[in-house]
Image (spheres, coloured by chain):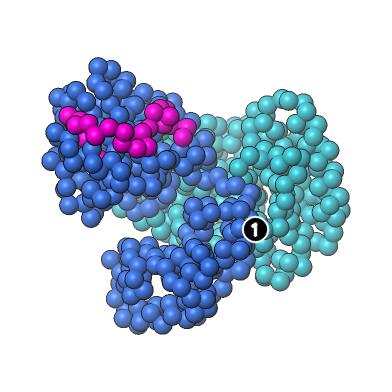
Chain colours: A cyan, B blue
Amino acid sequence: MLLDAISKAGTIALGGHVRPDGDCAGSCMGLYNYVRENFPEKEIDVYLEELPNTLKFMKNTDKIRHEVTEEKTYDLFIALDCGDMGRLGFSAVLFKKAAVRFCVDHHVSNQSFADQNYIMPDASSTSELIYDLLDYGKMSVETAECLYTGMVHDTGVFRYSCTHPSTMRAAAALMEKGIDFTKIITETFDEKTYAQNQVLGRALLESFLFMDGRCIVSYVTKEEMDFYQVKAKHLDGIVSQLKLTKGIDVAIFMYELEHGTFKVSLRSSEKIDVSVVASYFGGGGHARAAGFSMTATPHDIINNLARRLELQFNSGSEAE
Amino acid sequence: MLLDAISKAGTIALGGHVRPDGDCAGSCMGLYNYVRENFPEKEIDVYLEELPNTLKFMKNTDKIRHEVTEEKTYDLFIALDCGDMGRLGFSAVLFKKAAVRFCVDHHVSNQSFADQNYIMPDASSTSELIYDLLDYGKMSVETAECLYTGMVHDTGVFRYSCTHPSTMRAAAALMEKGIDFTKIITETFDEKTYAQNQVLGRALLESFLFMDGRCIVSYVTKEEMDFYQVKAKHLDGIVSQLKLTKGIDVAIFMYELEHGTFKVSLRSSEKIDVSVVASYFGGGGHARAAGFSMTATPHDIINNLARRLELQFNSGSEAE
């Protein structure tokens, strides 16, 4: 169906969600490369915000358009990995005007906002959906690299429960294209800078357990971030590392956005729904991963959090 | 061929290598459970040293024999994940006496020391080889859990270059048996105790770069290990985390075995053969993972290491 829509269009635009991650970039660039390689007569443009440097190894990322220079009307706009039109960001203006709007996504919140929708909330990643929709025999190694990257990022390297046997088999087929999968995982997913490792180390060392060891918390101040010369995006993964602590149900990581205001990230086991807690403080998210911002000292935040977490623990209701 | 040997034997013993890891335990327990479930008339015993607690979730690990109480002559002894007879440890005495000796292994150093050998040096794991040799239709979910665990451990969760498309497809098939793969990865591979995270944090925070940022080193003393109440086995993974530092070619982690003597672990990129360096100091290992022990202060060790590493860097020869 996607290939059918592509074959009928003369001009095609692709767009993904704001602050593109591995799956968003992988699905967009995988499809972009596939169309350029197999439909050389089509005019195709890809619209995405600036990618993290680690994802720029993907073929043709230098051709990504970071702004809309001309409000042209494309025959087909394909929105990828994007749950609603707002998440498209700067390219939404092109989406609205396009003759045919197509959406491929795996977010459970997706309300089928396009004309044609291929939404599989259970899928590992949008990249796996794109893999399914394209003709395997016509995928180049460069396209395979993009799709494999997206699958790796949204499955936490084949470990999250969204990973299905189909995901493993798709990865196997992409590996057979000759991609350097070890390098992709290391350089786009695992690798950290020396400063990132220092901050991770500090966060682990200064973490402490509370509520009888069911919760773990750590934080870094703005001053510390400046000292190590790291920004918010460099702190990815710290809350996940805390979450791996044996025996805990909730991991909390906070960093100072600006003087006195902290961004708080929560991760939980199936026993606790942290989205309820985050909502109480004006934030949001999912049952097992949620967050909010608060202007207070770290200890005030922890004390407030502890009360709300206690209610969740006592409610005894399992998170979905 | 393995099933053929099993069907001909009345009494069977299984043995793996000393200090059993995930693949050794997974392949032994996977095969053990398979035989018990499908050949109830056979007498089968499994001989292994004490398993790490995290691996004891596997079915029938309470039946493992940790010593040889009777030097009986089995019809068939199957050595798994074991490169030579010495590595069998305490069960070698039973291997020697068995009427038929069979070996399934993926170590490149294996010299086919049994009567019948199924040695595939390129395979991800002995568990994948066992998966290949058994009848998929007759594997229980408990057998699948064991084999999946072994594959996950020896591939670093499907990321090392020993991971093949066949590995991914075998994992997919094992997932279809209904295993809780997320729980297996978390609880046997990812999870760390609070104390382990503290020591990891400290090692990262106190790490430093040398040789123009091409090497990273960190160490913990006996006193620190006592303070955190961790033993050598709890330090697994620290050198791997150091190795993930962007831009480095060699990661070094040392811990104090006893007063003044350090165990030194080396990990390297393909640019450096650390086995040469380790051999120089009386140790050994592989091109990208090697180690040795030395009685000296950490700074003496680093200075000595730096000289040998410099020779390796200057030799310009790529490690195999």
* x and y percentages locating residue B65 in the rendered image: 36, 33
Identify the image quadrant of residue A105. top right
* x and y percentages locating residue B74 in the rendered image: 20, 30
The residue depicted at 71 percent of the width and 58 percent of the height is A206
Q: Is residue B6 left or right of residue A147?
A: left
Identify the image quadrant of residue B45. top left
Q: Amino acid at mark 1?
A: Phe
* x and y percentages locating residue A79 in the rendered image: 55, 43
Q: Is residue A77 left or right of residue B173?
A: right
Q: Is residue B6 left or right of residue A119?
A: left
Q: Residue furthest top?
A: B41
Q: Nearer the viewer, residue A167 or A226?
A: A226
Would you say the magenta stretch is mainly helix, strand or loop? loop
Which region is colored magenta?
Answer: B56-81
* Vertical relation: A261 (above or below) A198: above
Residue B226 seen in the current view: yes
- How many numbered markers are drawn? 1
Q: Nearer the viewer, residue B34 or A64?
A: B34
* Vertical relation: A110 (above or below) B156: above
Chain letter of the residue carrying label 1: B
The residue depicted at 77 percent of the width and 26 percent of the height is A315
The residue depicted at 44 percent of the width and 26 percent of the height is B178
According to the picture, the residue beneath numbered tag 1 turns out to be B227
Q: Does residue B92 show up magenta in the picture? A: no
Q: Is residue B22 left or right of residue A317?
A: left
* Vertical relation: B248 (above or below) A249: below
* x and y percentages locating residue B11 in the rendered image: 21, 26
* Vertical relation: A62 (above or below) A178: below
Q: Does residue B70 show up magenta in the picture? A: yes
